[in-house]
Image (cartoon, rainbow, N blue to C red):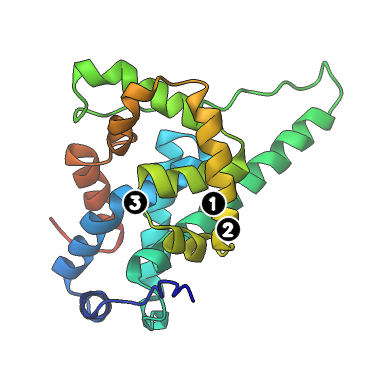
Amino acid sequence: MLQLHRDVAAPDDLDLARRAQAGDAEAFRAILRRHNQKLYRLARSIVRNDSEAEDIVQETYVTAFAHLGTFRGEASLATWLSRIAINEALGRLRKRRRQTALISDEPAGDAHIIPFPLNAGSDDPERTMAQRQILALVEQATDALPDVYRTVFVARVIEGLSLEETADLLRIKPQTVKTRLHRARALVRRRLDEQIGPLMLDAFPFAGRRCERLTAAVMKRLGFGD
């Protein structure tokens, strides 16, 4: 019988959570730096907007750190944070769609819809010039995926989560992950040459100055000095 991976917190997760709850600034900073990129990629896979994804990550940490006492280790800290980020992103997406519906229901001469930018605020010094165009194609192909496939694709292919981790994170069956991933890959392959596959793990980078900037912003919101 297949034994599914059980996503539970590592001792380090529990230690960091306890230290952060006690107000240890270094524990907060360690959590931020460890999970920034994963949360950013997941949020962006839903809202498809760089700056909004960063804002979602900030809100995720503020919400999570306000409720650290509820973290019991039934899931890993990464999964716990990821679920908060996904809920925040989906909430914003629903709100955006409601607002769009309200605007589109108004009489045609009285209102117009302002297009929501899909790729705003590109601040990515980590990318080399040689990779920039290729990675842009990867991101565009990923953005073009239907919602139901996009988050699975980002979690499995770009973020590198296992089948079981993705199923647990999204609270769907492993077979559903397989089916959606297969379809997502087929759609992406129509837009990309197979030779750029090895560069997938470098798509949607969130390191260096971007990571440090977000970490500093969250630390400031939590009341910690420099």
Q: Nearer the viewer, residue 27 or 170?
A: 170
Q: Is residue 174 above or below residue 44?
A: below
Amino acid under disc 2: Gln
Q: Look at mark 3 in the image and give the residue it sits on.
A: 38
Q: Position of residue 207 (x, y in %)?
A: 21, 41
Residue depicted at x 17% and y 40%: 208
Q: Position of residue 26 (x, y in %)?
A: 14, 67
Q: Nearer the viewer, residue 215 or 39?
A: 39
Q: Position of residue 175 (x, y in %)?
A: 58, 58
Gap in Å between the C-alphas at discs 2 and 3? 23 Å
Q: Would you say the residues marked 2 and 3 are in contact, meaning their CB atoms lie under 8 Å apart?
A: no
Q: Look at mark 2 in the image and give the residue it sits on.
A: 175
Q: Residues within 10 Å of mark 2 (few under 14, many from 20)?
A: few
Q: Secondary structure at mark 2?
A: helix
Residue depicted at x 54% and y 54%: 177
Split into 4 quadrants, where in the image is the C terminus? bottom left
Q: Position of residue 52 (x, y in %)?
A: 45, 40
Q: Nearer the viewer, residue 131 or 175?
A: 175
Amino acid under disc 1: Lys
Any mark on residue 178, and which?
1
Nearer the observer: mark 2 or 3; the answer is 2
Q: Is residue 119 visible?
A: no
Q: Secondary structure at mark 1?
A: helix
Q: Is residue 183 above or below residue 163?
A: above
Residue depicted at x 56% and y 29%: 187
Residue depicted at x 66% and y 47%: 94
Q: Would you say the residues marked 1 and 2 are in contact, meaning their CB atoms lie under 8 Å apart?
A: yes
Residue 219 lies in quadrant = bottom left
Amino acid under disc 3: Lys
Gap in Å between the C-alphas at discs 3 and 1? 20 Å
Residue 53 lies in quadrant = top left
Q: Is residue 174 above or below residue 142?
A: below
